[in-house]
Image (spheres, rainbow, N blue to C red):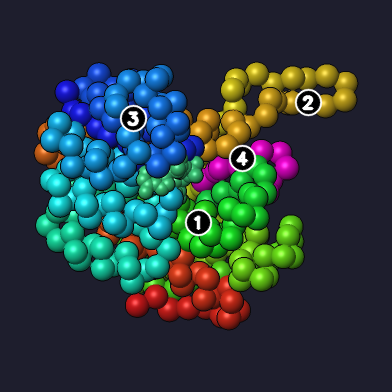
Amino acid sequence: MIKIAILGAGRIGQVHALNVARHKDATLAAVADPILTNAQALTASWGGIAMSDPLEAINHPDIDAVVIGTPTHTHIDLMLAASRAGKAVLCEKPVDLDLEKARAAEKALGDAAKRVMLGFNRRFDPGFSEIHRRVQQGDIGDLHQVIITSRDPGFAPMGYLQTSGGIFRDMVIHDFDLARWLLGEEPVEIFATGSRLLEPALEALGDYDTVMVQMRTASGKQCQINCSRQAVYGYDQRMEVFGSGGMLLNDNLRETSVRHYRGEETEARGPLLNFFMERYADAYRLEMEAFIDAIKTGSPLPTTVHDGCQALKLADAAQRSADSHAAVTIE
Ligand SMILES: NC(=O)c1ccc[n+]([C@@H]2O[C@H](COP(=O)([O-])OP(=O)(O)OC[C@H]3O[C@@H](n4cnc5c(N)ncnc54)[C@H](O)[C@@H]3O)[C@@H](O)[C@H]2O)c1
């Protein structure tokens, strides 16, 4: 059994604790959170020792791996401490909000970076991973375009937005990672537009609530990402890839596939699975399975700190492009 500690018992820590506890080859050995009652709420449900100090979990001799689900500004220190203690790490996105700090962390990890996975859970979504597999096996010929729609259901609290790092680093970072993964090449040019159509007060933060991004790779592949902080009809997560031999499309998920026909409307369907904990429940479970599987077999981790740095680089470039109203070349 792989003994795993969860650091941070908030929204994402709860998802990871559940998936560790349910895995047949893993045990939830500890949960650490400075708010001890948060940790205790999880250990009461899923087992393990509740701790208030993440370093106690990291340095515990019985623990094989740690999952970092703490606020973003704590990721690097915890990742480096866990790595020094010889633990495998699954760290939530983003690595950090500062690209130079993220790159320095990658360098400081050195060879141990091989044992640190980044929480880009969307790669494990069954629909998106099928699209990736089918692009790889040539089902749409040569890939020409990737189109990603990523809209949150409800506007985040201003308190959250003040420390989020902005829509590109906080939210679109997932889509930048998906784009790199699907394109199979690094984008070399980016043009982003940003608007404040929902909340003018975001101007004081230098942030936007509605953005569109276009990117091009050196070979000419294109990607467009559409993102909004608020879609009144729910969590809108779609993807389309287009190539010389066809197209693959992944639509939104609903609780059932039943459609209602009546006098006033036809094809009426239930609401979209709302927000990340429901919509990406399978993705988080499969992400944890991939992490545990890689620890057991010694195979390479599917996502890395380098992926985290590259996605952050695109987020920084998008912010510069939106701020300057100009295309940005990515070195
Ligand atoms: N991959 C995803 O889809 C996804 C979704 C949500 C959040 N996240 C990321 O996960 C991280 C946490 O986000 P959240 O929404 O769960 O936050 P949250 O505020 O709900 O939870 C954070 C928890 O960490 C605890 N904490 C604070 N400092 C700590 C420390 N030094 N050691 C241990 N615990 C500490 C807090 O007390 C809190 O319980 C962020 O980096 C966020 O970007 C990723």
The residue identified by callout 2 is: 266
Q: Amino acid at mark 4?
A: Tyr
Q: Residue at x 46, y 72 (%)?
A: 317
Q: How many marks?
A: 4
The residue identified by callout 3 is: 50
Q: Nearer the viewer, mark 4 or mark 1?
A: 1
Q: Say whether mark 1 is within 8 Å of ligand 1.
A: yes
Q: Which mark is residue 170?
A: 1
Q: Is residue 210 left or right of residue 18?
A: right
To which quarter of the image does residue 208 belong?
A: bottom right
Q: Residue at x 18, y 42 (%)?
A: 59
Quadrant for the C terminus, please: bottom left
Q: Which mark is residue 235?
A: 4
Quadrant for the N terminus, please: top left
Query: Distance from label 4 to label 3 (Cα)?
Result: 33 Å
N-terminal label among 4 and 3:
3
Query: Distance from label 2 to label 1 (Cα)?
Result: 37 Å
Q: Is residue 238 visible?
A: yes
Tag 4 near tag 3, CB within 8 Å: no
